[in-house]
Image (spheres, helix red, strand yellow):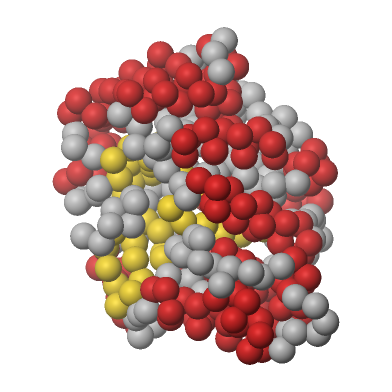
Amino acid sequence: MNGEPDLDSLYECARHGDIERADALFLVRHPHILFYIADELRKETKGDIVTYVVNRNINFTNVCIGNCKFCAFRKAKEEGYMLSMDTVLAKVDEAVKNEATEICIQGGLHPDLVLEDYCRLVKRIKSQFDIHIHAFSPMEIHHVARNSGLDEREVLKELKNAGLGSIPGTAAEILDDRVRRIICPKKLSTARWCDIITTAHRLGIPTTATIMYGHIETWEDRINHMFTIRELQKETGGFTEFVLLKFMRRNNELGRMVNREVGFAEDAMVHALARVILHPYCVNIQASWVKLGIPDAQRMLYFGVNDLGGTLMEENISRSSGASAGEYMSPDELERVIKDAGRTPRRRNTTYKLL
Ligand code: SF4
């Protein structure tokens, strides 16, 4: 928009997906307008329904050759763990008995694992259970390709053939190479992340999109990140949701470097901004109860959020960095949190079909 925007024109702009970077920066300086527009857009697209998925996280290994400065999860090969196939299958079995419709599998970048190992894992689960497998971040896909002497497209195709249903859009952190060189120097570049995501979408593999905020990034970096996601979504339509992940600062190098704590108001602004920038291309905005804690995740429902993610059943990565919300929310507990906020809970599957 040209000139100083007013509320009505900004709202109309947002409704039509025409918000520009300058408008987003204006909204950051005027949070009352930002909050109003985000809530209106949420009402318009999602009404009072707040969704969640019954799922289980499985972090199959913490052995990792990466060096992300925000990570308190990785271990060297001698000190780390690698779950056996039987252990993984027992966890899936337990999840299925607890009505899970999704298994989310992520792990460290184990130096010895190749495509065959990942395919075997997916195939074994799919041969025994009727469950959606949401697994392997773009960084893991990149790592498998590198370890196996293949390109990422082949890796994605093979994993899809093995039964992979969708991919977590983690490892995005902040999609800016200046920031990435500082916080995760060995991680794939912004361009590579976008390329793997686009390839997955073109192969019919949906993904989530994420942002890790609250460390060294600026508001401009956050806004640019959201615009990158918006452009990808306009092109492919393959993102199921945008997940906001607050940086957890305990027990990690980046936490010791960053001398600030993001408070509730800033959390609310980042979530609201995601709703406004991504509308109407990506209409599912998810708050993480693991990162924010349950009370603040619940409050985000007033700031553009319409999804509270999954029950998880276990969570190891955020807890290593100080997240304290626990590792399991039962469907009843999640529904109570949503109802207490005056909203209507609905269980969904991974691709947002209401169940
Ligand atoms: S965030 Fe992932 S890739 Fe980075 S060091 Fe930790 S486990 Fe490895």
- Between 252 and 116, the one nearer to me in the picture: 116
Residue 101: x %, y % from top left = 25, 48
Residue 249: quarter of image: bottom right
Give the residue displayed 65% in from the left and 47% down from the top: 173
> Would you say residue 300 is visible in this rendering?
no
Q: Image height check: is 188 above or below 236? A: above
Residue 336: x %, y % from top left = 30, 75
Q: Image height check: is 218 above or below 130? A: below
Give the residue displayed 73% in from the left and 52% down from the top: 255
Number of numbered discs: 0
- Indicate left or right for 272 with 117 as reference: right
Give the residue displayed 56% in from the left and 18% down from the top: 151
Residue 62: x %, y % from top left = 52, 31
* Residue extending farthest top: 149
Q: Image height check: is 301 above or below 79? A: below
Quadrant (top left, top right, bottom left, bottom right) of the N terminus = bottom right
> Would you say residue 31 is visible in this rendering?
yes
- Between 280 and 300, the one nearer to me in the picture: 280
Residue 100: x %, y % from top left = 24, 49
Quadrant (top left, top right, bottom left, bottom right) of the C terminus = bottom left
- Indicate left or right for 196 with 132 as reference: right
Give the residue displayed 34% in from the left and 51% down from the top: 351
- Between 280 and 222, the one nearer to me in the picture: 280
